[in-house]
Amino acid sequence: MATKRRRRAQKTNPNLVLLVAVSAIALGLSSVFGKSISELMNLAILSLVLCGSLLSIALIWLIVHQTKVRSQRQTAVFSEDVDGMAWSEFEFFAIKLLKNQKYKIEAHPSGPGDQGADIIARKNRDKFAIQIKHYSSKLDNKPVQEAVGAMAYYHCNRSMVITNSHFTAGAKLLAASNNCILVDREKIGEWILESSPSDSATA
């Protein structure tokens, strides 16, 4: 019985394709501008080196800038002794920060029977069910689930979780799929820095 032979698809070498493309472009430019291919190739290489150098400088500046901003936010958090606050102090601190961010506090149902929301706030057309967590470790999915679950009870269309810590990857994914805003310690530092000295939130 005759068997069919399968032809293996020949893989195209990307380097070969790039070389052919560059050579074709260089040949075309040489006919237009009257320069030799070698001169155009040298010009192209010089342009690539220059672009690479500029991109490297921009990348270094961006890294330095982000490191500086992160350091400023951490300094702001430490200066307010956020980690040293009691959980109740941190809640009122969060309320002041929210007010500085133009949120209108409508209710503060924190405590037993709060149905998953410590603060109910409004900004523009959005009404938020907000969970406040003062933790020393990363927050998992539970606070996000509580905030999202509180939306229906308090007739909110948005949710938020605020913490002095950070969030796990799972919590971030869950929040993103439920349009829940996560405010970690870096964001808190940003909010502190955005507050004017006269309006600075203090515990």
Image (cartoon, rainbow, N blue to C red):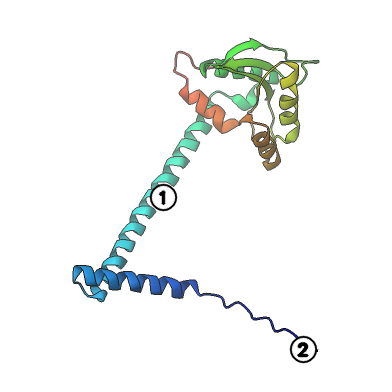
Q: Which residue is mark 1?
A: 59
Q: Residues within 10 Å of mark 1 (few under 14, many from 20)?
A: few
Q: Quadrant of residue 130?
A: top right
Q: Which residue is mark 2?
A: 2
Which element carries disc 1, helix, strand or loop?
Answer: helix
Find the residue positioned furthest to the front.
Answer: 1
**Image height check: is 47 above or below 101?**
below
Can you give x and y, in whole percent of width and height, for residue 168 in the image? Answer: 68, 40
Mark found first going from the N terminus, 1 or 2: 2
Where residue 119 sits: x, y (%)?
67, 16
Q: Residue at x 70, y 34 (%)?
A: 139
Task: Name the residue located 22 percent from the left edge and 75 percent from the top edge.
Answer: 36
- Taking 35 as reference, is 59 above or below it? above
Quarter holding the C terminus is top right
* Mark 2: amino acid: Ala
Q: Is residue 85 left or right of residue 195?
A: right
Mark 2 and mark 1 in contact (Cβ < 8 Å)? no
**For the point 46% across and 23% down, which residue is it?**
194
- Position in image of residue 160 (x %, y %): 65, 25
The reply, left or right, for residue 76 in relation to residue 47 is: right
Q: In the displayed image of the protein, which residue is found farthest to the left?
A: 34
Quadrant of residue 38 in the image?
bottom left
Give me the C-alpha separation between circle 1 and circle 2.
61 Å
- Which is nearer the eye, 179 or 31? 31
* Residue positioned 18% across, 71% down in the render: 34
Who is closer to the viewer here, 184 or 148? Answer: 148
How many badges with numbers are in the image?
A: 2
User: Visible in this render: residue 23?
Assistant: yes
Above or below, 108 against 43 in this view is above
